[in-house]
Amino acid sequence: MARHDLPALVRQFLRFLLGSCLGLAVDLALFETGVRLGLTPGLANVASSACAVVVVFLFVTKYAFRAERTTTSFFLFVCWYALSIAFFSVFIQVLHDSSGWAPFVCKLVSLPLSFGANFVFSRFLFRPRGGAAPPVPVQARQDLDG
């Protein structure tokens, strides 16, 4: 990666973080609700995470990666997240069972790991295709055109 690409990567990362935080708000609220309604922590995580995936997809495709929303990209995004959710649901359940920690704490412990994995995958999925340069923002085009 060229040095001049770093600010763009940081902006992309921060926008992904914002979209993930929106999804996380949905996720945590539904997770806690599910546990209070009697679901196991692992099952509550499956339900809450599935809802959050849609929120994250809608936000990050538009604001973080400026990618076109296609049926294929949604399918691949959901498939990845399904694997990620399954893995981290088991992780949360095992952590809860082995540590005795509150389910919500176990969920919080899983977040940095899942965020990192999901950012890397999303960046790969929504990268520009065919060697084309990423779109230049309008203000940058105006600056280049003089």
Image: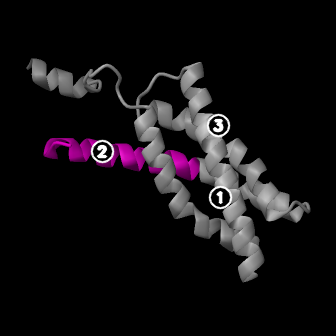
Q: Of the two numbered discs 2 and 3 on the same chain, state the one appearing first in sequence.
A: 2
The residues tagged by marks 2 and 3 sit, at their Cα atoms, a distance apart of: 23 Å
Crowding around mark 2 (Cα neighbors within 10 Å: few <14, some 14 to 19, many 20+) is some
The residues tagged by marks 3 and 1 sit, at their Cα atoms, a distance apart of: 17 Å
- Which contiguous range is marked in magenta? 1-22
Residue bearing mark 2: 9
Q: Amino acid at mark 3?
A: Val
Q: Residue 68, percent across and down? A: 47, 22
Q: Amino acid at mark 1?
A: Phe
Question: Are the two marked residues, 1 and 2, in contact with CB atoms closer than 8 angstroms?
Answer: no
Q: Is residue 6 visible?
A: yes
Q: Of the two numbered discs 1 and 2 on the same chain, state the one appearing first in sequence.
A: 2
Q: Nearer the viewer, residue 107 or 60?
A: 107
Q: Residue furthest bottom?
A: 100
Residue bearing mark 3: 54
Q: Residue 8, percent across and down? A: 27, 41
Q: Amino acid at mark 2?
A: Leu
Q: Is residue 101 visible?
A: no
Q: Residue furthest right?
A: 38
Residue 71, by quadrant, is top right
Q: Nearer the viewer, residue 37 or 40?
A: 40
